[in-house]
Image (cartoon, rainbow, N blue to C red):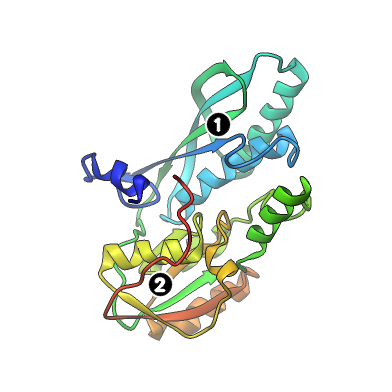
Amino acid sequence: MNKEDYFISLFDKKYIGDDGALINDMVVSKDLFCENIHFKRDWMSLYQIAQKSMLINISDAIVMNAIPKYALIGIKLPKDITAKQMREIRNGFNDICKKYGINIIGGDTVSGDRIDISVTILSYTKKPVNRKGVKAGDLVAFTGDIGNVGKELVKALRYNKTTSNSKFIKPILRENFFYEASRWINTSLDISDGLSKDLSRLSKINKIGFKFLKKFKKYELCSGEEYEILFTFDKKNIKIIRNIAKKHKTPITIFAKAIRGKYKNICKENHF
């Protein structure tokens, strides 16, 4: 049993199903970033931990074509944390929020035996892009590359170290490309749980399958926390999409076509 899907099914689904909840022109999104689940302090500095926890939440807003404006932060901190360490965490939050024009407006703090962070982002959109809307014949693409984050995780688990400039430490968001291209994009989400898992989400909600135009290795399909953008668009707009990507120096890979049928995730579930 997929316990994540089961638990979500226990609640009213009126606002559940996209990267954030769309309420009128507001998108509300939340992600958890937990020590010994998403990171170890041996792998990342406190600044990098705070920075990534904010970026992965902003990613949800971007893929819904929403501009993030406000953040609420819930954080659990060890009792022995120092004032200097708290300032380092603060700086990680503040530097990302400053870049994206976000105001931190509140939250909550508790003590515990590890660092756990919960961020809620309030964003605004004039034309939201959802996960539902894939049509047979649509092309399927993603930004950047996939697979390297999974390799970095293996390296971290085996050798207790990471590469400082990797996307595992600092996700690369593609907001400039996406905001301009959004009018020609039918559906989107960020690749947080692996390309295969996120394709299965598109498949389920749209009752559609995918014909792959490119072969992938399993580690590429299963590499989570990429935070690249997975999106679909009408094939007649391929030139427009490519030109916008070139303008913003955003690599894109068109790798599949939507067809009748269904697609099943081939990777191990991450959340339970």
Residue 214: percent from left, percent from top? 53, 83
Q: Residues within 10 Å of mark 1 (few under 14, many from 20)?
A: many
Q: Are marks 2 and 1 in contact (CB under 8 Å)?
A: no
Q: Quadrant of residue 246?
A: bottom right
Residue at 70% across, 31% down = 91
In this view of the protein, which residue sits in the foreground, 268 or 91?
268
Q: Residues within 10 Å of mark 2 (few under 14, many from 20)?
A: many
Q: Above or below — where is 161 with respect to 215?
A: above
**Tag 1 secondary structure:** strand
Q: Is residue 167 visible?
A: no
Under mark 2, the amino acid is Thr
Which residue lies under the disc numbered 2? 232
Mark 2–mark 1 Cα distance, whole angstroms, equals 32 Å
Mark closer to the chain start, 2 or 1: 1
Under mark 1, the amino acid is Ile
Q: Quadrant of residue 215?
A: bottom right
Residue 134: percent from left, percent from top? 31, 71
Residue 213: percent from left, percent from top? 48, 85
Q: Mark 2, mark 1: which one is toward the viewer?
A: 1
Residue at 71% across, 18% down = 81
Q: Report the label total.
A: 2
Which residue lies under the disc numbered 1? 117
Residue at 67% across, 63% down = 148
Residue at 23% across, 45% down = 13
Residue 94: percent from left, percent from top? 65, 33
Q: Above or below — where is 240 with respect to 134?
A: below
**Tag 2 secondary structure:** strand
In this view of the protein, which residue sits in the foreground, 232 or 152?
152
